[in-house]
Every structure is written in C-alpha cells, then in structure tokens.
Image (spheres, helix red, strand yellow):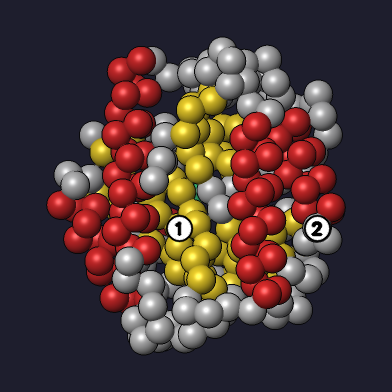
C-alpha cells in the first residue's frame, strides 16, 4: 500500500531529508585522496547524531555502518573499511537519517581528485538521469513514467541501467511501497498522488548493466568491473510537480 503523508509527516520528512542533505555537504569536504571510507563513516555518524537524528542504515538488516561507500566498480552497499581513497577514484556515498521516526535517503557520486573523462561522463549523465526522472513527477503521473525517462537517458548515453535495485517509498520506514524502478513503460504502474514520498535513484554503469554481489553479502559490483554511479533524492509529490526533501 502506498501511503499519503500528512502535513505533519511531510514536515518531519523534510527535516530528516535536510539532515541527509547537510551530511552530504559536510562529508563532501572530506573526500580526498588518503581518507579511508571508515573515517568518512565516522564523520557521518557524528554529524547525524549531532543533528538529533540516527543513521538509518546502521544495523539495517545487519548493515554494519552508518553510510554506504561504493568505489569505482562498486555499485551500491559498499561497507566502509580501512581502504584509502585514491586520486582518480569515484565514490558513491549513500546516506540515510531518521529524525523523530521519519527517514531521508540520498546518494551521490563524488570525484576523488582528478578523474578520467569516462568517469566524468558517467557521473554527468547519471545525474542528468536522476533529474530527468524527477521532471515527470506530479500528481496524476505514474511510476512507469519515471523509469521510462531514466532508461531513455541511459540509452541515449549508452550507459547500463542496473535493474536489480530500485527506488522506493520513504516514510516511517526506510523502504516502503512503491518500488520505483529505473526502467519501465510510460502510463503504467501506480498512480502518483500529492503527499506520496519516494526516493528516485538511478544506478548507471559505464559498461554492462549486469551486476553481482560480493562475498561480504552486501557490496554489489559491475560484472565487467567498469565504474558505476548513483544519484538519489527523496522527494514529495505535489499537485503540480515535486519538492526535493534531501536538498543540499
Ligand atoms: Mg534509497
Ligand atoms: Mg539511498
């Protein structure tokens, strides 16, 4: 069932989303060669706690950290570790925060130092795919409209669309109905109504769309080891469009 949030709930989701956006802004300044993903995780944990929230991902289905840090060919769910970021890496950081019982969820891919033109291309057009997906959202649109335009942007730039993982509703649970796939057909799927809150999150690959999961049971990586990018915002559907809750 897809819930319609009350004004009070939307206000709390906005505050949770703002903490996520602010945590991204804060972490961004620390992304440089030599920093470990564990250090970034600790910074995020401290920032979220100091904001009066808790990290949504910590212990979620057993996830052992506060944020997901996925480097280069890692698509999502990378576990923070003692691995140091290197010049030329890209890192996707996924952050969730729970404030007074409501969640915000946003991922972003960042460059570490100077990156290759291929990685710049991947990042630019994955971000474009996110905003294209958001652009069709308003009351009366359908979930399939989002996936249709995301996958058309991916196709235009010859990027692989990860299909095993999807966007989702957000509320008092981190993952709620509906699923928001990054593929689909226009005019199909659940109808969007004002007050629905969803996370739209294209995961696009420079090469094959195929992915698999590592032995740690969390990290998803591309089958051809080419890089992947991930851009995600949590938004609320309005009568005439949408509002981003995880603003920077
Ligand atoms: Mg999400
Ligand atoms: Mg996320």
- Return the residue nearer the eye: 59 or 113: 113
The residue indicated by pointer 2 is 157
Residue 46 can be seen, yes or no: yes
The image quadrant of residue 94 is bottom left
Q: Of the residues under marks 1 and 2, which one precedes in the sequence?
A: 1
Say which of marks 1 and 2 sits in front.
Answer: 2
Residue 212 can be seen, yes or no: no
Above or below, 2 against 31 in this view is above
Quarter the N terminus occupies: top right
SS at circle 1: strand
Q: Residue at x 83, y 61 (%)?
A: 158
Mark linked to residue 64: none
Relative to 102, 2 lies left or right: right
The image quadrant of residue 241 is top right
Relative to 95, 72 lies left or right: right
Q: Position of residue 63 (x, y in %)?
A: 40, 63
Q: Position of residue 7 (x, y in %)?
A: 36, 15
Beta carbon of the mark 1 residue lies under 8 A of ligand 2: yes
Q: Position of residue 233 (x, y in %)?
A: 50, 43
Query: How many marks do you count on the picture?
Result: 2
**What is the crowding at mark 2: few (fewer than 14 residues within 10 Å), some, or many (at least 20)?**
some
The image quadrant of residue 102 is top left
Q: Residue at x 45, y 62 (%)?
A: 93
Distance between mark 1 and mark 2 Cα atoms: 24 Å
The residue indicated by pointer 1 is 94
Q: Position of residue 26 (x, y in %)?
A: 29, 59
**What is the crowding at mark 1: few (fewer than 14 residues within 10 Å), some, or many (at least 20)?**
many
SS at circle 2: loop
Above or below, 85 against 158 in this view is below
């Amino acid at each position: 069932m897809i819930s319609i949030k009350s004004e009070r709930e939307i206000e709390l989701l906005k505050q949770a989303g703002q903490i996520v956006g602010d945590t991204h802004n804060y972490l961004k300044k620390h992304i440089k060669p030599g920093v470990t993903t564990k250090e970034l995780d600790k910074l995020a944990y401290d920032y979220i706690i100091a904001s009066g929230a808790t990290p949504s991902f910590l212990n979620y289905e057993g996830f052992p950290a506060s944020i997901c840090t996925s480097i280069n060919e890692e698509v999502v769910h990378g576990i923070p570790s003692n691995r140091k970021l290197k010049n030329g890496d890209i890192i996707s950081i996924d952050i969730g925060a729970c404030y007074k019982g409501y969640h915000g969820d946003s991922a972003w891919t960042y460059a570490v130092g100077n990156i290759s033109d291929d990685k710049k291309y991947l990042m630019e057009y994955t971000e474009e795919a996110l905003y294209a997906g958001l652009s069709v959202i308003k009351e009366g649109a359908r979930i399939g409209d989002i996936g249709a335009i995301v996958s058309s942007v991916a196709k235009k730039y010859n990027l692989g669309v990860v299909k095993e993982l999807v966007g989702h509703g957000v509320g008092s649970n981190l993952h709620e109905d509906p699923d928001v796939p990054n593929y689909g057909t226009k005019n199909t799927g659940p109808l969007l109504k004002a007050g629905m809150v969803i996370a739209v999150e294209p995961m696009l690959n420079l090469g094959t769309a195929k992915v698999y999961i590592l032995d740690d049971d969390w990290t998803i990586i591309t089958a051809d080891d080419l890089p992947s990018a991930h851009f995600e915002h949590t938004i609320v559907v309005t009568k005439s469009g949408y509002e981003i809750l995880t603003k920077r």
